[in-house]
Structure formats: C-alpha cells, structure tokens
Image (spheres, rainbow, N blue to C red):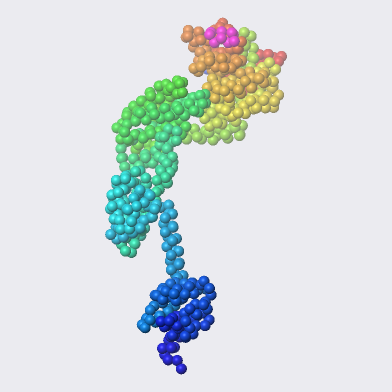
Amino acid sequence: MLTPFEVIFANIAQGIALLDSDLRVLVVNNRLSQLLQIPELTMGMDAKAIAEQMPAHTQARLWLTHLVTEQKSLQQEIEVGNGLLSLTSTPVSEGHWLIQCKDISAHAAIKKELSEQTNLFDTTLANMPHGLCMFDADKNLMLCNAAYSRLYSLPEQLTRPGTPLQQILDHRVTVGNAPAHRETYFDVVAEAALKRAVASQNISLMDGRVIKISHSPMENGGYVAAHEDVTDAVRADEQIKYMAGHDPLTGLPNRTLLREKIDRELAVSGKTSSLLCLDLDRFKEVNDSLGHAVGDLLLKAVADRLTDCLRDGDSIARLGGDEFVIFQTDVQSRDQASSLAQRIIDVVDKAFIIDGKSVRIGVSIGISMAPDDGDMGDSLLRHADTALYKAKAMGRGTFCFFETVMDADRQARRDLETVLQQALESNQFELYYQPQVDTITEQVVGFEALLRWHHPERGLVSPVEFIPLAEETGMIVPIGEWVLRQACKDAASWPADIGVAVNLSPLQFKSQTLAHTVVSALGDAGLPASRLELEITESVLLTDNDTALATLHHIRSLGVRIAMDDFGTGYSSLSYLRLFPFDKIKIDQSFIRELGNSKDCAAIVKAVVDLGASLGITTTAEGVETSDQLNRVREQGCSEIQGYLFGKPLPISSVHELLKRHSPEAA
Ligand SMILES: Nc1nc2c(ncn2[C@@H]2O[C@H](COP(=O)(O)O[C@H]3[C@@H](O)[C@H](n4cnc5c(=O)[nH]c(N)nc54)O[C@@H]3COP(=O)(O)O)[C@@H](O)[C@H]2O)c(=O)[nH]1
C-alpha cells in the first residue's frame, strides 16, 4: 500500500530523484526514467552507472557525467528525442542532491515561435522602404527603423528608444528636412488622436520633398507613424494635371483650363468681361510652305507677343492649331476690348523672324462680352467663335463683336452644308458653259464650265455663294469631281476643235487622287486630253507648293492644258509663272473692266499680254462686256476673250445652238 506522498511522488509531472552524497539514488520516480529515457533507474544505483546506461554523447549523459565530476548545482536545457528537458541539480541537506527534470518542449516551441516572429518583425522593419516610428504618450521614441533614420538623416543616437520627438525635429531643422509648415505636421497627429484612427497627409519638407505621413494612435496614448517619400508620385501627378490643362507647344493653358477659369471668374466677379477668339491668317500657308518646324516656332513667337499684350489677371489659352483665346475680366467698356483687339492685330501684323526668315501673318478676332453674350465659358467661346467667323469673312486682319443675328447666319450656313451633300446625291447641280473666243477670228475655241445649283426652294444659287462653303466643308472634292466628269462628257459631244475649261479648287489638289481622277474622267468620256484645260488660281500654289506642282506636272504630262485664272489679283502671280509652264494666263476681269478708265490697268494688261507672247503663253481677257473693251484687248494682242459680249454662261442645250451658229458645218 502506497502512502499518499508516494502516490503524489509517482504521479507528478516532473521527474525527481534524491541522491546521497555519494550520488547514489535514494529515491526516484518513474517520470524521471521516462523523461531521460533510461530503462532501469532504481534506488541504490549510482549516478555514474546510470550515465553509462544512457546512449553515448547524448546531452543527458553529458549532463549527468558533469554532475558526477563537478558535484555542483547545474541547470541546463537538453534535447532528448524530439523534446526539450530542463535538468537541474540542487544540493540539499546532508550533502544530498535533488535532481529535477521538467519537460519544457511546449514552452520551448512557444519561445521559438516568438523568437522567429521577433526576427521576422525586425527583418521586416529593417527592410521596409517606408520609415516607421513609434512614440509613447510623452512623445519619446519607442522604436524606429533604418528607413526612418535615412529619410531624415538622423544620427544613431537620435534613433535610440527614449529620444524625445522634439529633439528629432530640432535636428531636422538644422539639416533642412523638417516639415516646411510645422502646423500641418501636427495637424495629422492631432487628427489621428481625435479620430482614434489612421490619419494621412502629404507634408512638404524644407528640402522640397513630399512625405506622406500616416499616424495611427495607440491605446497607451502614443502612436505609430509610417513615413513614405511620395515626392516622385506627387510631381508626376502635378505633371499629369499640368499636361491635362496646358498646350505642350506654347505652355499656355488649353481650352479645358481656360473654360474652368472663365466659369470660376464669372461666378464670383459679376463684372463685365470680354473674350477674344483669335485665328491666325495665312498660318496654314506658312506651315505648308516652310514646314511644321517653322510653323511651331511661329506659334510660340505669336504666343509670346500675345502674352506681352496682357494685363495682370488676363488669361490666355491656345485652343489648338492657330487658334488662341484671351479672356479679360473687369472690362470697362467695349472700347477697351476693341483697343486690345487692335493692339493684338498690330503686333501680330509685324514680321516674325523665324529661323532667319521673315514671316508675315495676320490675325482675325471675334469678341463676345459677358454677361451680355453669355455667363459661362462655353457660351462665350461659342459666340466669340461665331464673331470670328464673321471677322474672317469680312476680309481678315480685323475684329468683330458678336451679335445675336450672327447665330442665325451660322446656323443657316450649317444647314447649307447638309443640303450640299443632298444636292450632289439628287443631281441638283448643272454645268453652264461660257464661250471662249479667238480675238482675231471671233470663232469659239472652247467653253468654260461654270457650276450652277438648282436649289429646290431657292432656285438657281450662284457658285459665289456655295463654292466657298463647299471648300470649307471639303464637299468641293466630290463636287469638283462631278464637274470634271460631266464637263468631259459634255465636251466629248462637241466638235473636235472645241475645248472645255474646268475650274479646280486648291482643296482638290490635297486629295492626292486628282491626277487619277483626271485620267479616269477623260477615259470614261473618251475625250482627248488636249481638249481639256484646267484653271487654277495662285492659291493652289500658295499651299503645299511642292505637292501641287508635282500634281500639275503629272496632269500636264498627260497633254491637259493648265491655265492660271484671275491673273493679277494675287500678290505673286508673276513669280508663279516661273514655277510652272502655264499654257494660258486669264487676265482678271477687274483689269478689263477698268481698261477705258485707268491707264494703269491698260498698262498692266499690255504688260501681261507681252509677257505671255514672249513666253509662248496664250492670254485670255476675262469679263469682256463691251466692243470698246474688245478693241482694246485686241489692239494689245490678247489671244482670246471671254465675257458677256460674246455670251453669258449657258446651259448645255444652248451650247449646241451656239456652236451651230458659229460654225454651222461643224455643229
Ligand atoms: N472650283 C470651282 N469654281 C467654280 C466652278 N464654277 C464656278 N466657279 C467659280 O465661281 C465663281 C463665280 O462663277 P460664276 O458666277 O459662274 O461667274 C463666272 C462668270 O459668269 C463671270 N463672268 C464671265 N464673263 C463675265 C462678264 O463679262 N461680266 C461679269 N460681270 N461676269 C462675267 O465670271 C466668272 C468666271 O470666273 P473665272 O472662273 O475666274 O473665269 C468664279 O470664281 C468661278 O471660278 C467650279 O465648277 N469649280
């Protein structure tokens, strides 16, 4: 029968043995032999014998051997199998030794896990790209990582726990990376504390960097803060915002930014404002003839000159292409807007020296006034644009204020654009033909095809009204092709010595397919190329000179004749004669009309006729209405005439009649 003490002794979790002074076992429980994995451990055994029972080189055997040789208090953690034991020898009364053995495997596992986690935390902290710091309730540093000290160039002694925040901030002031506005920095801290949640804010530093600080309050009244250098992201963001609101070429605000500014100003100021919409005259010609690089430099130079015209508070924007806008608030009167417009016209009119070349352009301006013409950016821009359209129609180099009636005009023009397309589709166009007559024989040598439009409601519409519109909308290309094909078809039914002249618009040269269209029209109609004459004005050569010249040479090489129309009305008619071997010069009717009244006109006509004769170019006098004019141009040696004296433009049916009258056997 076991005593209660023996029962407890046998069942306690610890292994226990009591050794006498000779290290013999006086008493031992089973738990000790289990834990040390010693098969036989009985009373009376000495420690040395026990050690010899144990597998060689095990930590437990070494420990026991150590006790035998040293006979002193020992405490050691030893591994047995997969477990971990804590072994202790303690001297007790009468030279006895108490041996205690505890299984601390579970405790060791927790300790190991904790140590692993601490290592992990330390590694994470050390390798975090963002600075991290922890301050206690008294604002003394608890910990910070390497990124934090790097971010603010903190010496090692300021990264030690216990360093006051103030000391760190003072150091940052001396090295120049403290928050530029200390109050915003403390706002984040205060906000986080108040919300008892994370508060983030971008803080600008004295050195220009931007740091995103996220403060999280802790239960103990302190806080953890993450510091991230977001300078690059903030700069990129600023750059994107800038680009979204600015024109990359001139650096001026764009339409979006300007519109926002106008809306903002109009909402608060309530004062009279003016908006000037600018469109450069002849810019396209410069761009096409001198190249886009020169065009870009010119736009920058224009932007500089315009900016110089502004007062403080005025706004300028480039809307794209050659369009600029100026917005002036607090305008006293329309006169003030007029004088700004005139000043702009004057400065843009002065020659620009670009790449060593002198370039001259002009500017047309449309003006709308707030609040009369609109109280929002959009409506002001739309109305100024309508006025600009009018200014351009008035002859360019001028300015024009918006008037309500203009809106109606513009709408009417838009409607006309739509109906032009319909007109082509439903055969509302017709060609009239005006005879061209030999000055000496007075025989018809050809006809000029002139377009007419039978509008279902308006009746016969003059080409003066719709050709410019067709040119603006690009509709002139399909319309011009129709004219060419119809004229070739009609002329194929005339006598073989009668030619046909067709007007070409500059835009048709841009389509790249003009030469092909000419070949196809001649082929389809069966008309010899020599019977077709194409009339161009100098504006064809003003824009994209090289391409137009190449197309002209190609067409002329087919045998088609090329005439220069309206000669003398442009600035460079003479110089274009050097550029291309024209077959005919058509002297503009404005000179013929004045023949009897102006000696200058007579002299010009004579000079052109002589020039034509010396270059072997036919000359045609346009707009001959009287016998006097006929006699004068005949005297001066002009080869052909065209004008009401010999016939107005006629429908095709009347052409056959006329041909019969002039050469009955041929018609
Ligand atoms: N690109 C194209 N342009 C075309 C086409 N058809 C015509 N046009 C151009 O439209 C302008 C006006 O033409 P129109 O009203 O037909 O006027 C022509 C003649 O009627 C007029 N003319 C002729 N003789 C006289 C005259 O004695 N007196 C007088 N007051 N007017 C007269 O001149 C116009 C011909 O001009 P031009 O072409 O310069 O020879 C006009 O610019 C046409 O070119 C087309 O199909 N395509």
Q: Which residues are magenta?
A: 606-615
Rendered view: 66 above or below 449: below
Which of the two residues, 467 or 505, is positioned nearer the viewer here?
A: 505
**Residue 451 sits in quarter:** top right
| Residue 609 shown in magenta | yes
In the image, 323: left or right of 622?
Answer: left
Based on the picture, tell me whether residue 337 belongs to the magenta stretch.
no
In the image, taking residue 522 as reference, residue 370 lies left or right, namely left
When asked about the image quadrant of residue 110, the answer is: bottom left
Q: Position of residue 390 (x, y in %)?
A: 43, 29
Q: Is the residue 231 above or below the residue 460 in the image?
A: below
Residue 569: image location, x then y, percent:
50, 17
On the question of residue 86 being in view, the answer is no
Instruction: Count the marks.
Output: 0
Give the residue drawn at x 42%, y 78%. 100
- Residue 600 is situated, as x and y percent measured from the top left of the image, at 47, 9
* Quadrant where the C terminus is found in the figure: top right
Q: Main secondary structure of the magenta part?
A: helix
Q: Nearer the viewer, residue 640 or 520?
A: 520
- Residue 285, percent across and down? 50, 25
Q: Quadrant of ligand 1?
A: top right
Determine if residue 314 is in view: yes
Residue, far top: 635
The residue lying at 40 percent from left, 80 percent from top is: 97
Horizontal side of residue 362 vs 421, given as left or right? left
